[in-house]
Amino acid sequence: MNEKKAADVKELFLNPETMNIDQVIDGIQSLHKKFLRYFDVENPRMKNDIHKKYAAILEKEILPEKETSIEKVYEDLSFYAQGILKWNHHGTMININPPATLPSIAATSYVSLYNGNGAQDIACGYLLTTELIVIKMLCQLVGLDYKVAGGIFTFGGKSTNLHALKHGIQRVSPDAIENGIKDEIVAFTSTQGHPCLPEVCGWLGIGEKNCIRIPTNQMGVIDIEILEKEMNCALSEGKKVALITANGGTTIQMTVDPIRKIVELRDKMVKKHQLNYKPRIHVDSVIGWVMLFFKKYDFKTNPLDLLPGALKKIQRQLQKIEDIKYADSFGVDFHKTGFCPYLSSVYITADVSEIYAQGKLKPIPYKELEYGNYSPFQYTLELSRSLNGPIGAYVNLKMLGFAGYQKLIGNLYNTAERLKELLNAHPRFEVINNEDSDGFVTLFVAKEIHNDTSFFHLTNKDVEETRKFALFNHKFYLYIFEQQKLGKCWFTLDYASGYKVLSNGIKIGVLKVYQMSPYFTLEKVEQMVQDLDRLISEFDLIKDSFKVKEVPHKPRSFVFR
Ligand SMILES: *Cc1c(COP(=O)(O)O)cnc(C)c1O
């Protein structure tokens, strides 16, 4: 059936009379079979035997004149399954890469059978209520009055930060929507703030250089005194402060800034400089929000058997992030620590009228919202907007509840804690972020010599020795990277520039474990350290002549600066 008559094309769509979805289920089964040809249980990546540049592939892909059978299309598509990093795999530990729960995938795919447009309720029916419900649940999780607060799903954590700045500008220059920005506007964040924070300053036209970065202490926490000084400085020069973004869990160190103190400082500045607006305080909590599920954890009886170190870190993170309720707004990425399919981000503001103001509209009071008048497209950045975000989040929040999220995040903390213990007990490895991070990422170094100088004492050595130390780490990373390609290493240890500058002013690359899969269990941790022990012994035998040959992709380059 290579060619179809016009009438047959309709069979590619869900038949409104039978509502038979066999084609979808068969299609998924067929794709699954084809994709699985590249599957290897021992490898976090799908097998990859394409050794071509993209140009060579693109030259062969041509828009067909005639129709192509779906089996052939799926066959062609499955070729590109090569090299996928499987986020569900226990050995995937590159970054904030969470697999999505199967029920959230089922639900988001299923609703696409009807219409996936969350622009207004009259199109997708009460399904859009899931957006309002998730926002209500998040407000309750944080401790905001959901009848006054509001939120919207949008395309990513970056967009939650974009909205924060937009609302900051709305406060400073309410007529900027009409007339453009006339004031000189600045925004503040710490040096640890996400790179997208200055980027959104560029996107919204206040300029990246007006995103002022405040230094931090060793724990990565913003220096409030310098923030005060810099705010005073900007305000005295007649600049307007639209936004202060507090970190609510940075990507690696998972730092949470003192939100309440920042709010107090803001209030003090409003008085001191007699401002006729309140600079906005937003928490970039797209990762860290999830710690709030531990509000209902019994830390005394510890039903999840969290290791003592994990328990302490979770408790400290919770205590800091609970201050979100004092901020004007915050962000949540369900596609990160919410374990939902892409993309699922929520921006929440304590005052819903700021959201309606995006479209120069008066807010519809909570009690008056009803089927037919919920039309977010009138004020959202997106016009057509995907329902997938709210649907996935709704399914996971209800299905997992406090208890389920505690289990998922508890396991990440427990495995990280055990990994840190085992690495530190090994004479060739040293964890470097146990003291200055309450997150679940593990940064460590591999040492050339048994019980060699501590990473923290490298400062006393001369530069050449530090360089040698750093080179060994990078070479070991390259070795493990090659072993992955050869199918002899089941985990994707990464190499990262780290965030520590040694006191001789040098920054070196370190090894990074950012596990996210619930299948990375305590048993897998034991296995991983045993395998690391074997790998480093094997590497010892060949290290002098070692040149990396076969790798999954271009490796990360040596960091020494
Ligand atoms: C991931 C991340 C972002 C950006 O979010 P996207 O969903 O990737 O757009 C912003 N801030 C922090 C702290 C993040 O971890």
Image: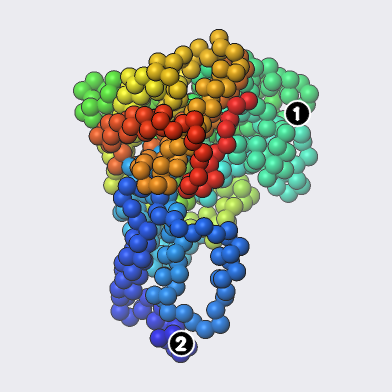
Residue under the image location 56 percent in, 65 percent down: 57
Q: Is residue 103 something one can see in this rendering? A: yes
Compared across the picture, whether 181 is left or right of 476 comes to right
Indicate which disc residue 239 carries: 1
Q: Is mark 2 on a helix, strand or loop?
A: loop
Crowd tier of the residue under label 1, counting other residues whose Cα lies within 10 Å: few below 14, some 14–19, many 20 or above:
some
Label 1, ligand 1: CB separation under 8 Å: no
Label 2, ligand 1: CB separation under 8 Å: no
Indicate which disc residue 3 carries: 2
Report, in whole angstroms, how far the alpha carbon at label 1 lies from the one at label 2.
66 Å
Position in image of residue 315 (x %, y %): 35, 22
Q: In which quarter of the image is residue 317?
A: top left
Q: Quadrant of residue 37?
A: bottom left
Q: In which quarter of the image is residue 275?
A: top right
Compared across the picture, whether 213 is left or right of 479 comes to right
Position in image of residue 41 (x %, y %): 31, 50
Residue under the image location 65 percent in, 40 percent down: 199
Q: In this view, does 320 lie above or below 492?
A: above
Residue under the image location 68 percent in, 28 percent down: 212
